[in-house]
Image (cartoon, grey):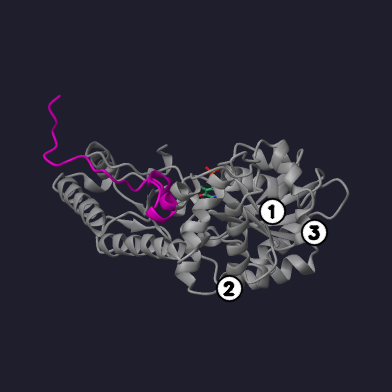
């Protein structure tokens, strides 16, 4: 088939960090774990070592469980904080609400998820308190757990003092604090603080620590700082089909990535690529940057013709995340050359649309696009 394009189809994309493959450190650990026999269901040395490395990283005696994905990590850990008559408070744009097909409600036997507003994908103590005080009668599902996402669905990052303030509020109100850390590494790379500063020291009871998007093959860790809450969590995992039989292949990548610091290097690299893309896009007057890009994503509004043109050139990215606009996500293997090529295509397409007389009226918010 004849192509209109005179350049190669891109081999890397800006759709999601899960488009990227397995990083060399995780791959090497998987290969090493593939020698000889090892006990199943987590009774192996890889799983022991991975859990110990996570305990070292957080500088505390936490309980660690490895599950297959973030939806399971979030919904099972949230379920362990709640009874079915409780409610979970999260941001309106939270993955827990929008991208888990009702799994948190399902695994908690009906706990209601209540949605809160907040700029840049973040909750605030005031908003939490307002939601809790709004109804305190027996007819309303009793607020029990607050869920924050770090880094947020908008590519922003909670600062340590913002989280500490949320933690003080949840404690005062008798609530539990859950953190969706699918991109926790990107948040730590941005903040340059010790992981404990934005977790248990800030009052986080349980963290879903993501590895997949950071370069692992598959798997997330559920980290209970509140160890009482971890009671019988192994049964919950088993019942939900989340107890891996050959668990070493979930845990070995953690060893590869934590040992030697690849987890943080990869996240910092992804963040740098997003910063580079932001630098290239923010000077273009037709491009509106939607959130401060602090982690590994840039959210931007572009003219529809440019979005269509990028897709025609083979670039893949999402337009349905958050509040609309395009989401450009960088990963551990995104190169500066990828960013340059992508930004150059955006620039060229913008120039093309500006030559047309009705550019302004053609500019449609991508809010409606799916
Ligand atoms: C990707 C992601 C998850 C995990 O999703 P799975 O597809 O279930 O692994 C959780 N939270 C956020 C914010 C995410 O971006």
Label 2 to label 3, Cα distance in Å?
A: 25 Å
Tell us which disc is closer to us: 2 or 3. 3
Q: Is mark 2 within 8 Å of ligand 1?
A: no
Q: What residue is shown at x 22% (from left), y 56% (from top)?
A: 337
- Judge left or right: residue 28 versus residue 243: left
Residue position for label 1: 89
**How far is the residue under mark 1 from the one under mark 2?**
20 Å
Query: x, y (%) of residue 111?
Result: 75, 43
Please give the residue where the numbered disc 2 appears in the rendered image: 160
Chain part drawn in magenta:
1-28
Nearer to us in this view, 201 or 90: 201
Asked if residue 149 lies left or right of residue 274, the reply is: right
Q: Mark 1 near mark 3, Cβ–Cβ under 8 Å? A: no
Instruction: Say above or below: 3 vs 182.
Output: above
Sequence order check, earlier mark of 1 and 3: 1
Lower position in the chain sequence, tag 1 or tag 2: 1
Quadrant in the picture for the C terminus: top left
Q: Is residue 133 visible?
A: no
């Amino acid at each position: 088939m004849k192509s209109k394009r005179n350049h190669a189809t891109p081999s890397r994309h800006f759709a999601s960090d899960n488009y990227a493959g397995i990083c060399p450190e995780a791959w090497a650990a998987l290969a090493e774990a593939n020698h000889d026999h090892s006990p199943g269901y987590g009774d192996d040395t890889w799983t022991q070592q991975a859990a110990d490395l996570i305990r070292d990283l957080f500088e505390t005696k936490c309980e660690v469980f490895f599950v297959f994905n973030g939806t399971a990590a979030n919904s099972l850990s949230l379920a362990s904080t709640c009874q079915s008559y409780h409610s979970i408070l999260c941001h309106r744009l939270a993955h827990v609400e929008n991208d888990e097909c009702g799994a948190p409600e399902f695994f908690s036997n009906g706990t209601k998820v209540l949605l809160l507003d907040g700029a840049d994908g973040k909750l605030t103590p005031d908003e939490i308190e307002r939601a809790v005080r709004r109804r305190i009668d027996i007819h309303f599902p009793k607020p029990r757990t607050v869920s924050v996402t770090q880094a947020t669905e908008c590519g922003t990052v909670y600062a340590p003092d913002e989280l500490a303030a949320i933690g003080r509020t949840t404690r005062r109100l008798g609530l539990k604090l859950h953190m969706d850390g699918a991109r926790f590494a990107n948040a730590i790379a941005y903040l340059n603080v010790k992981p404990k500063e934005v977790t248990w020291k800030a009052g986080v009871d349980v963290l879903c620590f993501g590895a997949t998007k950071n370069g692992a093959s598959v798997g997330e860790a559920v980290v209970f700082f509140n160890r009482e809450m971890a009671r019988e969590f192994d049964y919950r995992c088993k019942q939900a089909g989340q107890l891996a039989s050959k668990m070493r292949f979930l845990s070995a990548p953690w060893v590869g990535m934590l040992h030697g610091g690849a987890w943080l290097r990869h996240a910092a690299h992804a963040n740098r690529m997003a910063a580079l893309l932001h630098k290239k896009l923010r000077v273009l007057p037709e491009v509106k940057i939607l959130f401060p890009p602090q982690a590994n994503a840039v959210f931007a509004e572009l003219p529809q013709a440019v979005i269509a043109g990028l897709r025609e050139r083979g670039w893949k990215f999402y337009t349905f995340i958050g509040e609309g606009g395009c989401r450009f996500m960088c990963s551990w293997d995104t190169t500066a050359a990828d960013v340059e090529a992508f930004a150059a295509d955006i620039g060229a397409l913008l120039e093309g649309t500006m030559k047309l007389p009705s550019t302004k009226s053609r500019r449609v918010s991508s809010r409606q696009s799916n």
